Image (cartoon, rainbow, N blue to C red):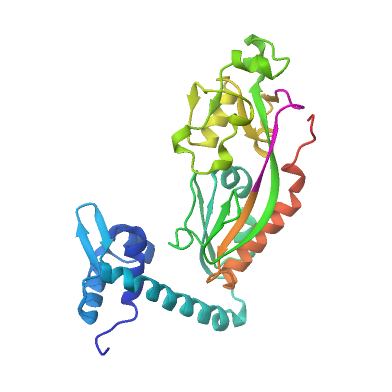
Amino acid sequence: MGDFNWNDLKSFLAVARTGKLTTAARSLGADHATVSRRLVSLEEAMHARLFERHPTGYSLTAQGERLLPLAESMESTALAAYAELANSNMSVSGAVRIGSPDGFGSYFLAPRIGDLCRQHPALEVQLIAMPRIFSLSKREADIAIGLARPQEGRLSARKLTDYHLKLYASRTYLETAPEIRDSCDLAKHKFVGYIDDLLYAPELDYLSAVGTIDPQLKSTNLIAQLKATVAGAGLCILPYFIAKAEPELVPVLPDEVMLTRSFWLIIHEDLRRLARISATADFIVDAVYKARGDFLSQKAG
């Protein structure tokens, strides 16, 4: 125990979660040589080989797998202690990373997040707006905006809001396209949608609700779909809170095609009591509440 350095466990956890030395180093704010030395130091102190080194990255050995839950437990205890003591003055400072779907992050949160920064000058906000699921257990984000309540893990989830999606097209596209009187006419039209085998969440499988549709133009990115639709590439199912801001877009068959999905705010139980996390979460909840009318449309609107 005399040679054991508790700080080496932070490097161990970062590499175990990312599988990459350089990525782990960036997350720790250190250089990769320092992280490598810490891993070697930990292995020597424990008289155990914790990682297999490969050209493509690091993978845990059997002994590393045994250490992982113990290291995570120690991390949880440290975070709980910090939340209990360091929060006594409720200082909102440090970095908070928010992982969000691209549409919500770019179109709803980004225009508002500056208010949070102004309220807390010592807070650093990192907004990751990408079409993917963020692993809070791997610390890919401190707060995640998800499309469904998580079913496992030590996670705290709160429903932010339901939101509507409708079928949209640009005015330019509709001027020259065949008339759309009912859903049977949709087969005559071009569509914009997601790439089927790259859907990161089942809640994004929109087109199956419309019919047997195979889009000609596909993208993993909602903003790309939006821009293509505005430019006249075809019909597309889009969130109402995003499409309503585009004057070129009009709803198609609004009484027949309207889907409802939900946004959830998700935080790891170990982090939710930290001042910077709770302040950021409260800000997001309040911002959504104030704008709740933007997410749900009237049926025919």
Name the residue rendered at 32%, 72% in the picture: 66
Residue 36 vs 1, above or below: the answer is above
Q: Is residue 35 above or below residue 212?
A: below
Can the viewer see residue 177? yes
Q: Quadrant of the N terminus?
A: bottom left
Residue 87, image x, y percentages: 58, 79
Q: Quadrant of residue 298?
A: top right
Q: Is residue 189 magenta?
A: no
Please tell me in which quadrant of the rendered image residue 53 appears: bottom left
> Can residue 112 be seen in the rendering of this structure?
no
Q: Dividing the image into 4 quarters, which one contains the C terminus?
A: top right
Residue at the extreme bottom of the image, as rendered: 2
Camera-side residue of 299 and 222:
299
Give percent across and percent down for residue 19.
31, 58
Task: Classify residue 203 as left or right of residue 218.
Answer: right
Which percent across, then down, holds residue 120? 61, 66
The region drawn magenta spans 252-262
In this view, the residue in front, 224 or 62, is 62
What is the x, y in percent for residue 213?
Answer: 56, 23
Residue 48, above or below 143? below
Residue 62 left/right relative to 84: left
Depth order, front residue of 8/108: 8
